[in-house]
Amino acid sequence: MSEPIVSICDLQYRYRGQKEFALNGINLDLSKGEFLVVMGPSEAGKSTLAATINGLIPHFQKGKLIGDVTVMGRKTRENTVAQMAEIVGMVFQDFEAQLFSTNVELEVAFGPENFAVEREEIGRRINENLDYVGLDAIRHRPPSTLSGGQKQKLAIASVLALKPTVLVMDEPTTDLDPISKMGVFEITHRLCKRDDLTLMIIEHETEEALYADRVALIKDGKLVKVGAVREVLSDVDLMEKMGVMPLGIPKFFKRMGIRRPKVLCSIFESNLPLTPEEGFEAFTKTDWKISESAYQKLVSEEHAALAKLNRPLIQCRNLEHSYSKEVKALDGVSLDIFEGDMVAIVGQNGSGKTTLAKHFNGLLMPTGGEILVNDLPTREQGVFKLGQRVGYVFQNPDHQIFSETVFDEVAFSPRLRKLSEDEVKQRVKEALKAVGLAGYEEQDPFALTKSGRQRVAVASVLAAQPEVLILDEPTTGLDYAEQRSMMDMVCRLNEQGSTIIFITHHMWVVAEYARRVLVLKDGKILLSGATRDVFSHGDELRDSSLRPPHFVEFSNRLGHTFLTPEEMSNCIEGVQD
């Protein structure tokens, strides 16, 4: 048996000034040409593990390192980061921090130039890798003018130009829209087929782990399980216990196996289907039938609930917005947002999602058409007045938070409106309770996790007691458990009377939490309606560079659109609750 390309032996690491080990007893080998996906909750040690492969730990990030990381016979503690860069390529989660050249071509050339590669060979590598990632046509553009997906592709091309034997990618699709994610995943799918490259990717999109050879689950700095993709992703209970999103299709078959164990044959129990194709094939081998009456009851109850939402709070009539003569971000948008609504706005970057949402509270004003909030044009109300009715939580909470304590942050808006201090205290108390941060009043908001800071940002908007709450990408940068917690909180606010509008790239969040969906493309509404109705239009969604979750795709193949494994299992004949 050949020696592993990467060997991690009894690895422990503790950051300087910390008491706990970020990595604790890691043992892991990677073979030549292997594709390993590392998954786990926030603060599990995933990025720390990645930084040990190329020597950033221990050479740049100081701390206590025990054990060894060996790559192609080189121990990282005995070789500099520059020496390790000859064999290990690294694409960081914050990929923009890797880009600094004046154009795309020079960015790709930078690494080989530093390793004294001959000019002719550098030119060949530039051409080869820009073509590989699909950026050849924009080789002379400055990186600053590229989209997020294009910047990520450029970072990958720049690393590939060094011809690494091992490539480590730390959450390469964080903050990217669906079309950009698909572009990056397409590249990783091709990379994993190369036998000259060992690939290790830290990923939070469970569906993309299907393309790996093995999956490693890490939590609290320890490897909980390492195994073949099917073995790990079929373990639904472990995935949920780990705080990693389980796939919907095995979750459905697991649930059905518990409820009807005699029907689910042993081959499914040990070999649960993972993909829409496998799910469809497996379902057709059973005697299960979808109850048409149960399904129609589900749909009719949904439509009846939507019909009760009949008081429009926000009305757009042929809304247009142009940032310049050449760029029309919104083009004839007409819609209603009703009191009590829970609406998701989706679409690729540049489709107009955020531009539309910023019109709802006056951050932007129409350049054509009209928008009414509570029957009055936004032009007549102004940002200050609209801000009392329509609250806006930005994608990055760090762009919104500025106070030294949680209390002062949440109290800012009520104080700005000159409320009495007793009323301020009451509003802060209620807002923090709503987001699950009661007792955090004196803490520094910047000392909290991303999820905690996001909750502070929501609380600071809630303290103004708006009728409508807009959240721009509320789950970005959060792990699965944090995403669930955030959206459960938002759902509770909706149940308590708040009208919710959220922008997201996570289609499972839309499927499980939104009542209605607006799909934007090129500044126009491509689809709108009840969530189930929108997700039944797979072709139109793909035309908008969106893709329903695998589970929804699976159910669509069976002729019925189900949004969760639970509701589908409750519609199988003979097992309804």
Image (cartoon, helix red, strand yellow):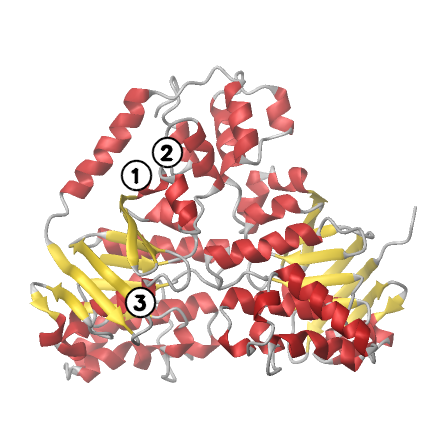
Quadrant (top left, top right, bottom left, bottom right) of the C terminus: top left
Q: Quadrant of residue 373?
A: bottom left
Q: Residue furthest left?
A: 375
Q: Quadrant of residue 65?
A: bottom right
User: How far across and down, in percent of the image, does residue 422 sit?
Assistant: 17, 79
Seen from the viewer's position, the closer of residues 433 and 280 is 280
Residue in the image at 35% along x and 23% along y: 576
Seen from the viewer's position, the closer of residues 151 and 295 is 151
Q: Label 1 near label 3: C-beta < 8 Å?
A: no
Q: Which residue is mark 1?
A: 533
Q: Label 1 near label 2: C-beta < 8 Å?
A: yes
User: How far across and down, in percent of the image, does residue 39 sit?
Assistant: 61, 54
Q: Is residue 306 visible?
A: yes
Q: Quadrant of residue 201?
A: bottom right
Q: Earlier in the sequence, mark 3 or mark 1?
A: 3
Q: Nearer the viewer, mark 2 or mark 3?
A: 3
Q: Is residue 85 visible?
A: no
Separation of disc 2 and disc 1 at Cα? Answer: 8 Å
Q: Nearer the viewer, mark 3 or mark 1?
A: 3
Q: Which mark is residue 329?
A: 3
**Dot 1: within a 10 Å radius of its alpha carbon, few (fewer than 14), some, or many (20 or more) residues?**
some
User: How far across and down, in percent of the image, does residue 249 sit?
Assistant: 51, 35
Q: Earlier in the sequence, mark 2 or mark 1?
A: 1
Q: Secondary structure at mark 2?
A: loop
Q: Which residue is mark 2?
A: 561
Q: Earlier in the sequence, mark 2 or mark 3?
A: 3
How many marks the image carries: the answer is 3
189, above or below 150, in the image: above
Separation of disc 2 and disc 3 at Cα? Answer: 32 Å
